Amino acid sequence: MRIAIINSRADPAGVNIRRNLLEMLGADGMRPVLHNTHTLNFMEVDRRLIHEEGLDEKCGADLIIFISRHVSVNPMPLLTVHVTGNYRAAELGGKPRSLAMASPEWMHAILRRLSDNVPFGYRVSYEVTHHGPTDLMTPSLFVEIGSTSEEWGDKAAGMAVALSILEAEPTTDTVNLIGFGGNHNAARQTDIALSGRGAFGHIAHTRETGTLNSAMVYLMAEKSGAVAAYIDRKSLPAATLRHIEGLIDGIGLLRLTQGEVTGLGEINWQSYCKIRKLAEEISPRCRPHIHAICGSGTPVSFEIIPELLSETLKLNTPAFIEELKALPVVHLTSSKSPVLPVFISYEENKSQITHDLITSCVKIITSDENTTAVGNDLIIRKMRFDPQKACDLGVPKGPLFGILAAGKEIKIDGHVISPSIVSACSERVIHVPGLEKYI
């Protein structure tokens, strides 16, 4: 890959980063430098980078990395990455309502390396899309040092950025996203990228979201190669949130929550989309939870005995979900249940996973001393407080009922009344064909 690295001679941060890059490469910056599998070509300009246009032909590169300073109204030591563009007027270079071509994979890779190499006292983050140049059809990104002259000239910061650029190696399994909402430094989008495969291209600040239309959201997705969108829901007013959701849905783009993005694990994106579609067919508006399933395959759904799962969840939901984490399976949640009785996995796993799920349920249920296995039946006996028996023994309604129901004995007129004599036994039978295989 041919990579152009561009800085302005008038920008101390850009000069700082360039100097460190050349020192690390042992080069003079006058000719292309081969680094790993990439050819780096350094270019310096006189004016501010935000006003540079027509760079595609000048650079002849596959990727353009601008190295620059970051300025903020709330100065802090900061290392950032972002792509360029304007959602409305062109106040800082470029053209109005125009976006440059993003490289989410490279921004993701560099951001993660910055996080590893960040000097003490600095933070790392994305920035929202907010300035020029905007006419770039070559994928590009800014890497910046902020936010005052002290940081711009800081050699440690310059070294960290230079090293992160040289160490960055994008992977092919990122999930490219566009983002909506949040502050200038896109805190939630940064967290998502640093904790998983979510790689952002264009991000719109909260103040921009209300002015976006379908054409601009489509352009954000197109210029980012996005397969899904993330909304920082807490940062948007309800009306704006509905507006953005409608625009995203209108262009046929998936909406993912932070949990869904970070929970993708190692599953192939195409397979994930098939799983989402299958989940929607099983139960509209349910949410799939990916566990140890990875790679690609043909997703299929299968059911276990609903009564068996229901009793398992009553006894110990956390234990069952902990068991799921080790299995190549997807479980579904709805507003009514933390685990639906229908699961998803790849076709080749179906038989084994079904066996493992039933085994987990049986193990949890039979760990209760009130459960016995007889043939192919699980017999579950439960003792419950019987108010009528308590009344028959002269126990007045009120706090004493609560004490007995909690399993503690009471005294009335010198007589001890234990919970066992005011309880009724209920029995539930769950038929599990081939039960002996799961015990």
Image (tube, helix red, strand yellow):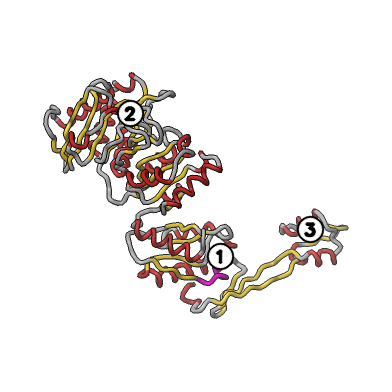
Q: Mark 2 points at which residue?
A: 93
Q: Name which of mark 2 and mark 1 comes first in the sequence.
A: 2
* Mark 2, secondary structure of its residue: loop
Question: Is label 2 or label 1 in front?
Answer: 2
Give the quadrant of residue 237.
top right
Highlighted range, magenta: 304-309
Element class at badge 1: helix
Q: Which structural element holds mark 3?
A: helix
Q: Which amino acid is tagged 3?
A: Phe
10 Å neighbourhood of mark 1: few (<14), some, or many (≥20)? many
Which x, y percent locates residue 334? 54, 59
Q: What residue is at 60 percent from the left and 70 percent from the top?
A: 371
User: Label 3 to label 2, Cα distance in Å?
Assistant: 75 Å
Q: Mark 1 points at which residue?
A: 312
Asked if residue 308 lies in the magenta stretch, the reply is: yes
- Picture coordinates of residue 71, whole percent (x, y): 37, 24
